[in-house]
Amino acid sequence: MISLVSSHTLTICKYAAGIAGNIFALGLFVSPIPTFRRVIRNKSTEQFSGLPYIYALLNCLLSAWYGTPMMSTDNILVTTVNSIGAVFQIIYITLFMMHAEKPKKVRMFGLLLAVLGLFAVIIAGSLHISDFTLRHILIGCLSSAALVSMFASPLFVINLVLRTRSVEFMPFYLSLSTFLMSSAFFIYGLLNDDPFVYLPNGIGTVLGIVQLALFFYYHNRAGEDAREPLIVSFT
């Protein structure tokens, strides 16, 4: 009886963590909205880069596929959050292409087709693997690698903060959302005993803690000479 109660409690905690992760992820998904308001208002992408949205789309697609029952066990909340994230990234990429100069537009369209083509190949290839364990490990490794690669942006921001001693380009609520989402899915992965979920999100949790610590340390310490132009639009 105690074992059943304990198992039921763990299941509730796992789903609570997954739902919380889905909610916290919205903070990340909506963070580029101010950037695109400016893009739409000025009818130009200026110096903003579209590459982060391409990387984010690939990450969301791979992670969403990994969370399906065909690739892993009981990870549907991973699929929901990344499916929503993929929709946001496609909207951002579309808006970027609508307002970019022709060379940027052509490049972004080519990268978008490459990502969608690669994802189609991965889906087709994984479905031809009859062994579930092998399929699980292969797609798990790909989704984890894509997620870890996304941490290049937080590392860039951390480096910028350390160089300028300013948190001007590290919004508090974005850093907080990153920490909360990563922490929630770290717990979710642990409770689901899934290293392909808890390992990359564990890294994200550590980076989130570092960002928050730097924010509180350097807050109000920046001088006027610490300002630099922001050349990317997704942190």
Image: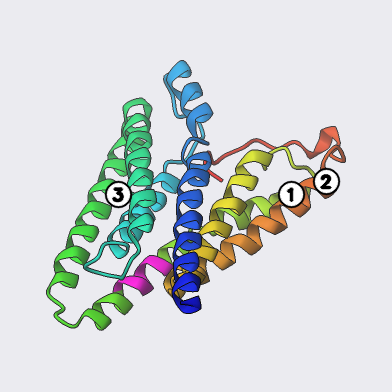
Query: x%, y% of residue 191?
Result: 49, 70
Query: x%, y% of residue 150?
Result: 49, 57
Query: x%, y% of residue 49?
Result: 47, 41
Magenta residues span 139-144
User: Which residue is rendered at x = 49% and y = 54% of the image?
Assistant: 16
Mark 1 belongs to which amino acid? Answer: Val
Q: Which residue is mark 3?
A: 111
Q: Which residue is mark 2?
A: 218
Q: Earlier in the sequence, mark 3 or mark 2?
A: 3
Mark 2 belongs to which amino acid? Answer: Tyr
Q: Earlier in the sequence, mark 3 or mark 1?
A: 3
Asked if labels 1 and 2 touch by Cβ distance under 8 angstroms, the answer is yes
Question: Element at badge 3?
Answer: helix
User: Which residue is rendered at x = 78% and y = 43% of the image?
Assistant: 166
Q: How many neighbours does mark 3 have within 10 angstroms: few (below 14), some (14-19), or many (20 or more)?
A: some
Question: Element at badge 1?
Answer: helix
Of all residues shown, which one is farthest toward the front?
A: 1
Measure the alpha-carbon separation of dots 3 and 2: 37 Å
Asked if residue 60 lies in the magenta stretch, the reply is: no
